[in-house]
Image (spheres, helix red, strand yellow):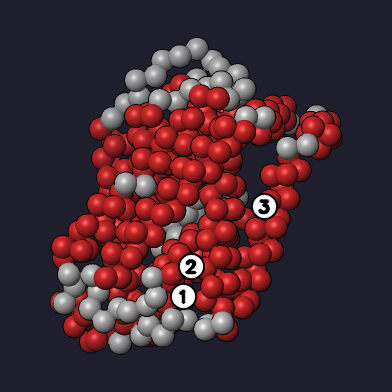
Amino acid sequence: MSVSTHVKLLLKILFSATAFVWLALRIDWAAWSHNLAGLNLGLFGLSLIIFFLTILPCSLRWHFITAACGFPIGFGEAMRYYLIGNFFNAFLPTARGGDLARGVLASKENRFRLGGVIGSILIERIVGLVTAMVFVLLTGIHLFSRRPVLKPIILSALVVFALASFVLLSAAHSRVRRFGLTELKKIPFRVLRDAADDIVAVFAVFLRQPRLVAWTLVLTLVNQLILVASGFLAGAAIPGFRVPATAFFFVIPLSFFAAILPSVGGFGIREAGYVLFWSWFAVPGELGGLYAFAQFVFFTVSALLGTLVFVFTRSRANRPLSPAA
Protein backbone atom coordinates (compact mmCIF):
# COMPACT_ATOMS: atom_id res chain seq x y z
CA MET A 1 0.00 0.00 0.00
CA SER A 2 1.27 3.50 -0.88
CA VAL A 3 1.58 6.36 1.59
CA SER A 4 -1.49 8.07 0.12
CA THR A 5 -3.52 4.88 0.57
CA HIS A 6 -2.47 4.66 4.22
CA VAL A 7 -3.39 8.32 4.73
CA LYS A 8 -6.84 7.81 3.17
CA LEU A 9 -7.46 4.76 5.36
CA LEU A 10 -6.42 6.65 8.49
CA LEU A 11 -8.72 9.54 7.56
CA LYS A 12 -11.66 7.15 7.12
CA ILE A 13 -10.95 5.55 10.49
CA LEU A 14 -10.72 9.04 11.99
CA PHE A 15 -14.10 10.05 10.48
CA SER A 16 -15.81 6.93 11.86
CA ALA A 17 -14.18 7.37 15.28
CA THR A 18 -15.13 11.06 15.39
CA ALA A 19 -18.73 10.21 14.54
CA PHE A 20 -18.88 7.66 17.39
CA VAL A 21 -17.40 10.20 19.83
CA TRP A 22 -20.01 12.75 18.72
CA LEU A 23 -22.72 10.16 19.34
CA ALA A 24 -21.35 9.32 22.78
CA LEU A 25 -21.46 12.98 23.80
CA ARG A 26 -24.87 13.63 22.27
CA ILE A 27 -26.83 10.79 23.90
CA ASP A 28 -28.15 10.47 27.44
CA TRP A 29 -27.10 6.87 27.96
CA ALA A 30 -29.25 6.29 31.04
CA ALA A 31 -32.35 7.29 29.08
CA TRP A 32 -31.07 5.25 26.11
CA SER A 33 -30.82 2.13 28.29
CA HIS A 34 -34.29 2.74 29.73
CA ASN A 35 -35.81 2.97 26.23
CA LEU A 36 -33.87 -0.08 25.08
CA ALA A 37 -35.50 -2.10 27.86
CA GLY A 38 -38.92 -1.05 26.54
CA LEU A 39 -38.17 -1.97 22.92
CA ASN A 40 -41.01 -3.86 21.22
CA LEU A 41 -39.14 -6.99 20.12
CA GLY A 42 -42.00 -8.19 17.89
CA LEU A 43 -42.00 -5.02 15.78
CA PHE A 44 -38.21 -4.93 15.86
CA GLY A 45 -37.99 -8.48 14.52
CA LEU A 46 -40.59 -7.76 11.83
CA SER A 47 -38.61 -4.68 10.81
CA LEU A 48 -35.47 -6.80 10.48
CA ILE A 49 -37.27 -9.38 8.32
CA ILE A 50 -38.64 -6.67 6.01
CA PHE A 51 -35.17 -5.11 5.82
CA PHE A 52 -33.81 -8.35 4.37
CA LEU A 53 -36.53 -8.39 1.70
CA THR A 54 -34.67 -5.59 -0.08
CA ILE A 55 -32.36 -8.20 -1.56
CA LEU A 56 -35.20 -9.46 -3.78
CA PRO A 57 -35.83 -6.33 -5.93
CA CYS A 58 -32.11 -5.49 -5.94
CA SER A 59 -31.09 -8.94 -7.18
CA LEU A 60 -33.87 -9.04 -9.76
CA ARG A 61 -32.88 -5.59 -11.02
CA TRP A 62 -29.24 -6.63 -11.46
CA HIS A 63 -30.33 -9.89 -13.09
CA PHE A 64 -32.37 -7.98 -15.69
CA ILE A 65 -29.59 -5.47 -16.43
CA THR A 66 -26.83 -8.07 -16.86
CA ALA A 67 -29.04 -10.34 -18.98
CA ALA A 68 -29.90 -7.46 -21.32
CA CYS A 69 -26.25 -6.42 -21.62
CA GLY A 70 -24.96 -9.84 -22.66
CA PHE A 71 -23.47 -11.31 -19.47
CA PRO A 72 -26.41 -12.96 -17.70
CA ILE A 73 -26.21 -13.45 -13.94
CA GLY A 74 -29.03 -15.64 -12.63
CA PHE A 75 -31.42 -14.34 -9.99
CA GLY A 76 -30.10 -16.77 -7.35
CA GLU A 77 -26.50 -15.94 -8.19
CA ALA A 78 -27.29 -12.22 -8.03
CA MET A 79 -28.67 -12.73 -4.50
CA ARG A 80 -25.48 -14.57 -3.53
CA TYR A 81 -23.27 -11.77 -4.85
CA TYR A 82 -25.39 -9.13 -3.09
CA LEU A 83 -25.05 -10.93 0.25
CA ILE A 84 -21.29 -11.23 -0.22
CA GLY A 85 -21.24 -7.54 -1.08
CA ASN A 86 -22.89 -6.83 2.29
CA PHE A 87 -19.99 -8.61 3.98
CA PHE A 88 -17.42 -6.48 2.17
CA ASN A 89 -19.45 -3.30 2.76
CA ALA A 90 -19.02 -3.85 6.49
CA PHE A 91 -15.31 -4.63 6.52
CA LEU A 92 -13.75 -2.67 3.68
CA PRO A 93 -12.78 0.96 4.42
CA THR A 94 -15.70 2.33 2.39
CA ALA A 95 -19.47 1.77 2.52
CA ARG A 96 -19.52 1.03 -1.21
CA GLY A 97 -16.63 -1.45 -1.22
CA GLY A 98 -19.14 -4.29 -1.45
CA ASP A 99 -20.20 -3.11 -4.92
CA LEU A 100 -16.64 -3.41 -6.21
CA ALA A 101 -16.19 -6.77 -4.45
CA ARG A 102 -19.34 -8.33 -5.93
CA GLY A 103 -18.40 -6.95 -9.34
CA VAL A 104 -14.91 -8.45 -9.22
CA LEU A 105 -16.22 -11.77 -7.87
CA ALA A 106 -19.00 -12.03 -10.47
CA SER A 107 -16.52 -11.20 -13.23
CA LYS A 108 -13.96 -13.76 -12.04
CA GLU A 109 -16.36 -16.64 -11.35
CA ASN A 110 -18.34 -16.18 -14.57
CA ARG A 111 -15.38 -15.14 -16.72
CA PHE A 112 -17.13 -11.91 -17.67
CA ARG A 113 -15.25 -8.74 -18.56
CA LEU A 114 -14.89 -6.67 -15.41
CA GLY A 115 -15.73 -3.36 -17.06
CA GLY A 116 -19.13 -4.63 -18.19
CA VAL A 117 -20.05 -5.95 -14.75
CA ILE A 118 -18.93 -2.74 -13.05
CA GLY A 119 -20.95 -0.77 -15.60
CA SER A 120 -24.11 -2.67 -14.63
CA ILE A 121 -23.46 -1.87 -10.96
CA LEU A 122 -22.91 1.81 -11.78
CA ILE A 123 -26.29 1.86 -13.53
CA GLU A 124 -27.90 0.46 -10.37
CA ARG A 125 -26.26 3.09 -8.20
CA ILE A 126 -27.07 6.05 -10.43
CA VAL A 127 -30.73 5.03 -10.72
CA GLY A 128 -30.81 4.45 -6.95
CA LEU A 129 -29.28 7.90 -6.38
CA VAL A 130 -31.86 9.61 -8.57
CA THR A 131 -34.74 7.70 -6.93
CA ALA A 132 -33.51 8.56 -3.43
CA MET A 133 -33.26 12.21 -4.42
CA VAL A 134 -36.83 12.17 -5.71
CA PHE A 135 -38.00 10.84 -2.33
CA VAL A 136 -36.02 13.50 -0.48
CA LEU A 137 -37.24 16.32 -2.73
CA LEU A 138 -40.93 15.40 -2.71
CA THR A 139 -41.16 14.78 1.04
CA GLY A 140 -38.88 17.73 1.76
CA ILE A 141 -41.18 20.08 -0.17
CA HIS A 142 -44.15 18.64 1.73
CA LEU A 143 -42.40 19.15 5.10
CA PHE A 144 -40.72 22.45 4.26
CA SER A 145 -43.42 24.79 5.59
CA ARG A 146 -43.25 23.08 8.99
CA ARG A 147 -39.49 22.40 9.06
CA PRO A 148 -37.55 25.41 7.66
CA VAL A 149 -34.34 23.73 8.85
CA LEU A 150 -34.69 21.38 5.87
CA LYS A 151 -34.17 24.16 3.30
CA PRO A 152 -30.42 23.58 2.70
CA ILE A 153 -30.97 19.82 2.49
CA ILE A 154 -33.71 20.24 -0.12
CA LEU A 155 -31.57 22.62 -2.18
CA SER A 156 -28.61 20.21 -2.03
CA ALA A 157 -30.85 17.33 -3.07
CA LEU A 158 -32.13 19.38 -6.00
CA VAL A 159 -28.56 20.03 -7.18
CA VAL A 160 -27.58 16.34 -6.93
CA PHE A 161 -30.78 15.28 -8.69
CA ALA A 162 -30.13 17.74 -11.51
CA LEU A 163 -26.53 16.56 -11.94
CA ALA A 164 -27.46 12.86 -11.92
CA SER A 165 -30.29 13.45 -14.39
CA PHE A 166 -27.95 15.44 -16.63
CA VAL A 167 -25.44 12.56 -16.67
CA LEU A 168 -28.13 10.04 -17.62
CA LEU A 169 -29.66 12.25 -20.32
CA SER A 170 -26.22 13.08 -21.73
CA ALA A 171 -25.27 9.40 -21.86
CA ALA A 172 -28.47 8.72 -23.82
CA HIS A 173 -27.32 11.00 -26.66
CA SER A 174 -25.36 9.19 -29.38
CA ARG A 175 -23.10 12.18 -30.09
CA VAL A 176 -22.07 12.36 -26.42
CA ARG A 177 -21.31 8.63 -26.41
CA ARG A 178 -19.18 8.93 -29.56
CA PHE A 179 -17.25 11.80 -28.01
CA GLY A 180 -16.75 9.76 -24.83
CA LEU A 181 -15.45 6.76 -26.77
CA THR A 182 -13.02 8.99 -28.69
CA GLU A 183 -11.64 10.38 -25.44
CA LEU A 184 -11.42 6.92 -23.85
CA LYS A 185 -9.11 5.78 -26.66
CA LYS A 186 -6.56 8.28 -25.32
CA ILE A 187 -6.22 6.49 -21.96
CA PRO A 188 -2.60 5.26 -21.83
CA PHE A 189 -3.24 1.95 -20.06
CA ARG A 190 -5.00 -0.63 -22.22
CA VAL A 191 -6.66 -2.42 -19.28
CA LEU A 192 -8.26 0.81 -18.09
CA ARG A 193 -9.17 1.80 -21.64
CA ASP A 194 -10.90 -1.53 -22.29
CA ALA A 195 -12.78 -1.34 -18.98
CA ALA A 196 -13.95 2.19 -19.76
CA ASP A 197 -15.08 1.06 -23.23
CA ASP A 198 -17.08 -1.77 -21.66
CA ILE A 199 -18.75 0.57 -19.16
CA VAL A 200 -19.79 2.97 -21.92
CA ALA A 201 -21.10 0.05 -23.99
CA VAL A 202 -23.22 -1.22 -21.10
CA PHE A 203 -24.74 2.23 -20.56
CA ALA A 204 -25.52 2.45 -24.29
CA VAL A 205 -27.29 -0.93 -24.27
CA PHE A 206 -29.23 0.00 -21.13
CA LEU A 207 -30.41 3.36 -22.44
CA ARG A 208 -31.55 1.87 -25.75
CA GLN A 209 -34.11 -0.33 -23.99
CA PRO A 210 -36.98 1.73 -22.50
CA ARG A 211 -38.61 -1.38 -21.04
CA LEU A 212 -35.42 -2.27 -19.15
CA VAL A 213 -35.10 1.30 -17.90
CA ALA A 214 -38.71 1.21 -16.69
CA TRP A 215 -38.24 -2.11 -14.86
CA THR A 216 -35.05 -0.81 -13.25
CA LEU A 217 -36.90 2.26 -11.97
CA VAL A 218 -39.83 0.18 -10.69
CA LEU A 219 -37.59 -2.29 -8.83
CA THR A 220 -35.53 0.58 -7.38
CA LEU A 221 -38.75 2.21 -6.18
CA VAL A 222 -39.85 -1.09 -4.58
CA ASN A 223 -36.48 -1.33 -2.84
CA GLN A 224 -36.84 2.17 -1.41
CA LEU A 225 -40.39 1.49 -0.23
CA ILE A 226 -39.28 -1.70 1.55
CA LEU A 227 -36.55 0.25 3.34
CA VAL A 228 -39.05 2.91 4.36
CA ALA A 229 -41.48 0.26 5.66
CA SER A 230 -38.67 -1.40 7.64
CA GLY A 231 -37.59 1.97 9.02
CA PHE A 232 -41.15 2.86 9.99
CA LEU A 233 -41.54 -0.38 11.97
CA ALA A 234 -38.17 0.16 13.64
CA GLY A 235 -39.40 3.56 14.81
CA ALA A 236 -42.70 2.09 15.98
CA ALA A 237 -40.77 -0.46 18.07
CA ILE A 238 -39.08 2.31 20.09
CA PRO A 239 -41.16 3.68 22.99
CA GLY A 240 -41.79 7.41 22.63
CA PHE A 241 -40.47 7.64 19.06
CA ARG A 242 -43.09 9.84 17.37
CA VAL A 243 -42.55 11.48 13.99
CA PRO A 244 -44.80 12.07 10.94
CA ALA A 245 -44.97 9.02 8.67
CA THR A 246 -43.75 11.16 5.76
CA ALA A 247 -40.52 11.83 7.65
CA PHE A 248 -39.36 8.29 6.93
CA PHE A 249 -39.56 9.00 3.19
CA PHE A 250 -37.12 11.85 3.86
CA VAL A 251 -34.69 10.38 6.41
CA ILE A 252 -34.28 6.83 5.08
CA PRO A 253 -33.13 7.88 1.56
CA LEU A 254 -31.00 10.64 3.09
CA SER A 255 -29.14 8.07 5.22
CA PHE A 256 -27.94 6.48 1.97
CA PHE A 257 -25.89 9.60 1.25
CA ALA A 258 -24.53 9.76 4.79
CA ALA A 259 -23.23 6.20 4.45
CA ILE A 260 -21.13 7.02 1.37
CA LEU A 261 -19.15 9.71 3.19
CA PRO A 262 -15.55 8.76 4.11
CA SER A 263 -15.70 6.12 6.87
CA VAL A 264 -15.01 2.46 7.60
CA GLY A 265 -17.98 0.56 6.21
CA GLY A 266 -20.25 3.54 6.86
CA PHE A 267 -20.16 2.77 10.58
CA GLY A 268 -20.36 5.78 12.83
CA ILE A 269 -21.26 8.16 10.01
CA ARG A 270 -24.53 6.34 9.29
CA GLU A 271 -25.49 6.20 12.98
CA ALA A 272 -24.57 9.85 13.59
CA GLY A 273 -26.57 10.75 10.50
CA TYR A 274 -29.72 9.15 11.90
CA VAL A 275 -29.36 11.01 15.20
CA LEU A 276 -28.85 14.32 13.36
CA PHE A 277 -31.66 13.77 10.84
CA TRP A 278 -34.20 12.78 13.49
CA SER A 279 -33.24 15.80 15.60
CA TRP A 280 -34.77 17.93 12.83
CA PHE A 281 -38.08 16.33 13.80
CA ALA A 282 -37.63 17.04 17.53
CA VAL A 283 -36.56 13.47 18.35
CA PRO A 284 -34.35 13.42 21.50
CA GLY A 285 -30.79 12.19 21.12
CA GLU A 286 -31.36 9.00 23.10
CA LEU A 287 -34.30 7.98 20.88
CA GLY A 288 -32.43 8.88 17.71
CA GLY A 289 -29.48 6.91 19.06
CA LEU A 290 -31.67 3.89 19.72
CA TYR A 291 -32.99 4.09 16.17
CA ALA A 292 -29.41 4.28 14.90
CA PHE A 293 -28.57 1.24 17.03
CA ALA A 294 -31.43 -0.70 15.42
CA GLN A 295 -30.07 0.10 11.97
CA PHE A 296 -26.59 -0.87 13.14
CA VAL A 297 -27.97 -4.27 14.16
CA PHE A 298 -29.66 -4.67 10.77
CA PHE A 299 -26.47 -3.95 8.81
CA THR A 300 -24.34 -6.09 11.14
CA VAL A 301 -26.66 -9.11 10.83
CA SER A 302 -26.66 -8.59 7.06
CA ALA A 303 -22.86 -8.55 7.04
CA LEU A 304 -22.69 -11.73 9.14
CA LEU A 305 -25.07 -13.49 6.77
CA GLY A 306 -22.92 -12.34 3.87
CA THR A 307 -19.88 -13.79 5.67
CA LEU A 308 -21.53 -17.21 5.86
CA VAL A 309 -22.48 -17.07 2.18
CA PHE A 310 -18.96 -16.01 1.19
CA VAL A 311 -17.29 -18.77 3.23
CA PHE A 312 -19.62 -21.70 2.60
CA THR A 313 -20.97 -21.22 -0.95
CA ARG A 314 -19.42 -21.43 -4.38
CA SER A 315 -20.64 -20.16 -7.72
CA ARG A 316 -22.24 -22.66 -10.06
CA ALA A 317 -21.06 -20.62 -13.04
CA ASN A 318 -18.51 -22.00 -15.46
CA ARG A 319 -18.92 -20.07 -18.66
CA PRO A 320 -16.55 -18.96 -21.42
CA LEU A 321 -15.34 -15.37 -21.51
CA SER A 322 -18.22 -13.04 -22.40
CA PRO A 323 -18.02 -9.53 -23.90
CA ALA A 324 -19.32 -6.55 -21.97
CA ALA A 325 -22.35 -6.03 -24.18
Q: Is mark 3 on a helix, strand or loop?
A: helix
Residue hosting label 3? 164
Above or below for 205 versus 154: above
Above or below for 155 versus 86: below
Determine whether label 3 and label 2 are within 8 Å by CB. Answer: no
The amino acid type found where label 2 is placed reads Phe
**CA–CA distance in space, label 1 to label 3:** 23 Å
Residue hosting label 2? 250
Q: Is residue 223 visible?
A: yes
Nearer to us of marks 2 and 1 is: 2
Q: Residue at x 42, y 48 (%)?
A: 222
- Label 3 crowd (10 A; few <14 / some 14-19 / many >=20): some
- Label 2 crowd (10 A; few <14 / some 14-19 / many >=20): many
Q: In this view, does 155 lie to the left or right of 180?
A: left
The amino acid type found where label 1 is placed reads Phe
The amino acid type found where label 3 is placed reads Ala
Where residue 27 appears, as percent x and y from the top left, is: 34, 84
**CA–CA distance in space, label 3 to label 2:** 19 Å
Residue hosting label 1? 277
Choose between 253 and 184: the one closer to the eye. Answer: 253
Q: In which quarter of the image is residue 186?
A: top right
